Image: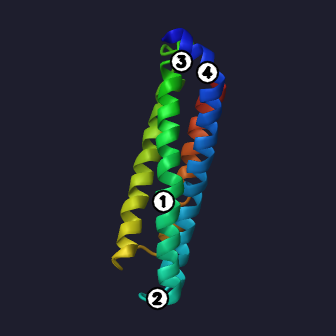
Amino acid sequence: MSYFLVDIYPYVLSLHIMAVISWMAGLFYLPRLFVYHAERAEKGDQLDETLKVMEYKLQRYIMAPASIVAWAAGLTLVFTPGIVDWSAIWPYTKSFGVISMTVFDHWLMIMRKKFRRDENTLTGRQYRMMNEVPTLLMVLIVVSVVVKF
């Protein structure tokens, strides 16, 4: 099994990178949609309904599949012999970043459902601030993997 994982490593890594890019695009865009939703839409108007559809489709058809593939490919990479040096700090900082990114993704899911039920209580400014979370986590994850401290 371990030889098989070594043989497919470049393909799994490629799939992982593509999935992470897709997931990150959604993590950057969905809070921006929430800003517009909170600041410009009135309950029940055409913009409100349009944003609800956009938010749902972004999360359901892009972000959710991408996060699942990113996690599956990432875990496959973790189990590939010789890829992760568990005596270093970077696997733990990356893991913290990825788990935090997943928690943020689930928070976005909860917020989208609040918008759907017309129960949002956060402001556009608050969503703008939350829009920085994936950037900070991305920096942590990328530096961890590239620098390997």
Mark toward the start of the polypeptide (2 vs 4) = 4
The residue lying at 66 percent from left, 28 percent from top is 146
| C-alpha span from label 4 to label 1 | 28 Å
- Is the residue marked by circle 2 packed among few (<14), some (14-19), or many (20+) residues within 10 Å? few
Q: What residue is shown with label 3? A: 84
- Is the residue marked by circle 1 packed among few (<14), some (14-19), or many (20+) residues within 10 Å? many
Q: What residue is shown with label 4? A: 9
> Foreground mark, 1 or 3?
1
Q: What residue is shown with label 2? A: 42
Which amino acid type is shown beneath numbered disc 4? Tyr
> Foreground mark, 3 or 4?
4
Which amino acid type is shown beneath numbered disc 1? Gln
Q: What residue is shown with label 1? A: 59
Image quarter of the C terminus:
top right
Mark toward the start of the polypeptide (4 vs 1) = 4
Q: Is residue 104 visible?
A: yes
Which amino acid type is shown beneath numbered disc 2? Glu
Q: Quadrant of residue 107?
A: bottom left
**Disc 3 and disc 4 in contact, CB within 8 angstroms:** no
Nearer to us in this view, 148 or 101: 101
